[in-house]
Amino acid sequence: MNKEIGGKLIALEGPDGCGKSTQAKLLSEWLESEGYDVKITREPTENPTGKVLRDSLRGKIELPVEAEALLFACDRAVHVSEVIRPGLSEGKIIITERYIHSSLAYQTSRGLSRKWVEEINKSAIDPDFTIFIDVPPRVGFKRVGASRKADVFEQDLELQKKVRESYKKLAEEENSPIIDGTKPPKKVHEKVKNEINPFLHT
């Protein structure tokens, strides 16, 4: 992955239902009140590849794990080219809900090689700061209102357990903060602010 000079790229990572969208909105509002020019974005994106990925994630279509990983990398390449890099060049703080760590966590948890996942995403810009928001899988499922048959639920639950552990491992490797997402949104936001504030002044 490559570094980019200009603005700042902040990635909010974490499992389904951890509250990334809520925290991205609260963080953006706070940063704007501090005088920063902010843009929120997310993955999968709204481009055609992102729409295919959302259909896959919602079970509307079925894709091999490798194909899905490549589509995520393709979607990310467009995301970087059309949204992230231009925003950084303009000096903006870009907040992305999900980024490269989501691919590493989910796709390696589904059996793919980490080295391969990193290779297909090597054109991505490194985030300047990453925050992991952690919730237990059952909490995440409850929040998103997942309606699943028992056998599928348990299969998903086992995957989410692996994903959660992968996120924790990535955070430890990079010394990135892990924030308890089970707390009320305002309390989570205060924790996010406390982590982000020193970074903004370095």
Image: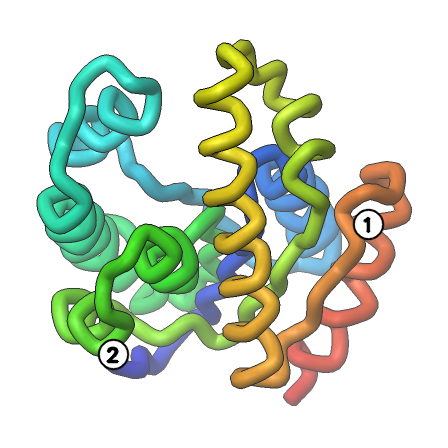
Query: What type is the residue that disc 1 sits on?
Result: Val
Mark 1 highlights which residue?
Answer: 188
Q: Is residue 155 left or right of residue 180?
A: left
Q: Quadrant of residue 7?
A: bottom left
Q: Along the horizontal axis of the image, is 19 left or right of 11?
A: right
Q: Which residue is at the front of the view, 43 or 152?
A: 152
Left or right of 70 on screen, residue 102: right
At 57% from the left edge and 49% from the top edge, which residue is drawn? Answer: 161
| Outermost residue to the bottom | 202
* Number of marks drawn: 2
- Determine the secondary structure under disc 2: loop
Taking 130 as reference, is 79 left or right?
left
- Is any atom of residue 123 visible in this view? no
Q: Is residue 163 above or below residue 53?
A: below
Where is residue 104 drawn, in percent x and y? 35, 63
* Quadrant of the drawing holding the N terminus: bottom left
Q: Please identify the quadrant where the C terminus is shown.
A: bottom right
Label 2–label 1 contact, CB within 8 A: no
- For the residue pair 143 and 158, the one nearer the viewer reads as 158
Disc 1: CA contacts within 10 A as few (<14), some (14-19) or many (>=20): many
Q: CA distance from mark 2 to mark 1?
A: 29 Å
Q: Quadrant of residue 165?
A: bottom right
Q: Amino acid at mark 2?
A: Met
Which residue is disc 2 drawn over? Answer: 1
Residue at the far front: name it. Answer: 151
- The image shows residue 130 at horizontal and vertical percentages of 55, 68
Check disc 1 and report its element: helix, strand or loop.
helix
